[in-house]
Image: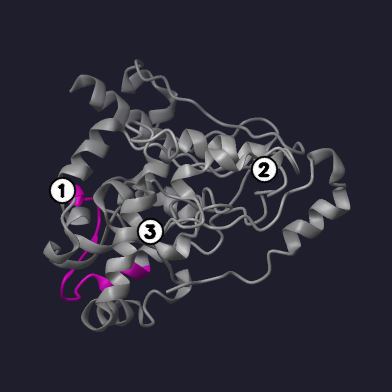
Amino acid sequence: RRQLGRRSTVVAAVEAKPLMVARGPREAAAGTAAADMPAEENPFMSDEEPQQAPGSRKLSHCEHCFDPEVDIALPSAVLPVDAVRLQSFNRRPPDRKLLLTWHGEHALSSSRDDVREGYREVNETVRLALVEHLGRKPDVSVGGPSLRYSFLMGNAHFCLIPRGRGWWTVRLFEAFYAGCIPVLLSDDQVLPFEDFLAWERFSLKWPMRRVGEGLYEHLTGLVSSNWPQVAALHEGVREVACWFDYHAPESASCSPYLGLLRQLARSAGPGQHDESDGGGAGPDSAGARPRRYERPPRWAVRRGARARVRRSRGPTRYWF
């Protein structure tokens, strides 16, 4: 219990700090907190204004930091105790009573001043919109942090996944343990393993600025009038969950470790990827995506070409 308390204190302290990026080309400034340091001696728990590292500056969300020719998106690890709890509440799709759920901190949270300020610093408004537009709808559980969240995720068809202080949130990967269909509400999030997993087969992506414009009605219509699609999405979640489970991979051909190796092999260039490693995500799998292209080796990508890759992403793609 003492260790869990320390971990929670450290997590809260880190989450409350402003986002920092160094002025150098590819350097980042980050702060660390000492887990064993008493709160009264811990500079990260001070009531004073957060201190920035020398040569750094405050930033809001960075829309162009991810370079697909250099960077790789990986799944976040869910703590083992949380993973077991989520799995224990994972109900069969026909037995789920809730349409959708989301609980978490936001800019009006009643828990802590520094948490509220953290979300205000990055102008995070999607979570506020969820509470405002969906909080009182039937068959919905939406609001601030809840001790029942694992149960709620396992009892809901759809888990809303708004961005956190950055573009991603661990809630996305918790959803796979709970068997809950993720509804992505972060326009610029780069998803893990997009090269070989077809996310539209086991998730939905809705414009994050339009959560109050038909999202509830659309999800209600799917469950009431298009159950085969909902059932297929649930099945897709079940089939690809192994790609996000760091703790107990059931097969050597499907795990986040293998996913990382496949991503690295693709980044190495043509001829470096071995198709034999994809037994759990071949073209016939519900979550599989055929390989579309091979990336050039890093040395072959000139600065101008890399910039064009960033700009060529085009408008955000949604699927629902």
Q: Which residue is mark 1?
A: 89
Q: Residue at x 25, y 84 (%)?
A: 225
Where residue 217 sits in the image (x, y, percent)? 29, 82
Q: Kindly report which numbered mark, 3 or 1, lies closer to the viewer in this rendering.
A: 1
Q: Which residues are magenta?
A: 129-150
Q: Say which residue label 2 marks.
A: 266
Q: Is residue 36 magenta?
A: no
* Residue at position x 51%, y 56% in the image: 283
Marking on residue 193: none
Residue, disc 3: 161
The residue located at (75%, 63%) in the rendering is 311
* Label 2 secondary element: helix
Residue 135 drawn in magenta? yes
Secondary element at tag 1: loop
Residue 133 visible to an observer of this rendering: no
Question: What's the distance in space between the residues labelled 1 and 2, CA to CA?
Answer: 37 Å
Spatial distance from mark 3 to mark 1, Cα to Cα?
A: 19 Å
Q: Is 39 in front, or is 146?
A: 146
Amino acid type of the residue tagged 1 in the rendering: Phe
Q: Earlier in the sequence, mark 1 or mark 2?
A: 1
Marks 3 and 1, the one that precedes in the sequence: 1
